[in-house]
Image (cartoon, rainbow, N blue to C red):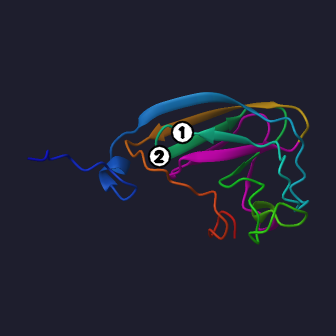
Amino acid sequence: MGYIQNAKPGVGAVGEYQAAGRPWIKLVTVSGTAHDLTNTAANANVGETRVDFPAVTKRVIIRNTSASDVFLHFASLATTSDGAAVANNNSAVKITKNYIKIPANTGTLDLGIKCRFIFLSSAAGATRDVEVIAELTNIQEPYDLNKRGLSGVTT
């Protein structure tokens, strides 16, 4: 005789987003490689920093207390717009400008979003410390936004 198991919550589980989330906080050092986001080259060595969450989020707050702007994006700068190999002028994130600037010196971004990871990059050559605070659900699915052709992320 088999065992009856309760279903695990998925990304469509409304109750997971209605209940208070589990807290998660981390001081993230953003890579020091300079980024020229007006240059659309999808460089394999982009120097971005990926922040992985242990579960799907319901809210993410990013505080930039450093002296330079930091940029948030949901796909890697090396994700290509055409599916071809990484080359000049084919960064899907840069071409479509699917990133947001978090201003220097206490710029705060508060997003009520579900994601499993984010990417942060710096406009200057030095490393930057950024506070990342998340409200987590109990959803363990791999919710991957790092894909070519995803509206608002890479197109």
Q: Is residue 65 visible?
A: no
Viewer-side residue, 14 vs 109:
14
For the residues labelled 2 and 1, the Cα–Cα distance comes to 7 Å
Q: The residue under label 1 is which amino acid type?
A: Phe
Q: Residue at x 90, y 43 (%)?
A: 34
Q: Relative to residue 62, is residue 148 depicted above or below?
A: below
Toward the viewer: 84 or 80? 84
Labels 2 & 1 near each other (Cβ < 8 A): yes
Q: Identity of the amino acid at label 2?
A: Val
Closer-to-camera residue (12/111): 12
Whether the magenta-drawn stretch holds residue 97 is answered as yes
> What secondary structure is found at the residue carrying circle 1?
loop
Q: Dot 2 lies on which element?
A: loop
The answer to whether residue 124 is left or right of residue 97 is right
Numbered badge on residue 53: 1
Residue 82 on the magenta segment = no
Report x, y in % for residue 154. Answer: 69, 65
Residue farthest to the front?
1
Mark yes or no: residue 42 visible: yes
Span colored in magenta: 95-123
Q: Which residue is mark 2?
A: 56
Quadrant that contains the C terminus:
bottom right
Where residue 101 sits in the image (x, y, percent)? Answer: 76, 50
- Picture residue at 73% right of the left edge, 56% below the top: 99
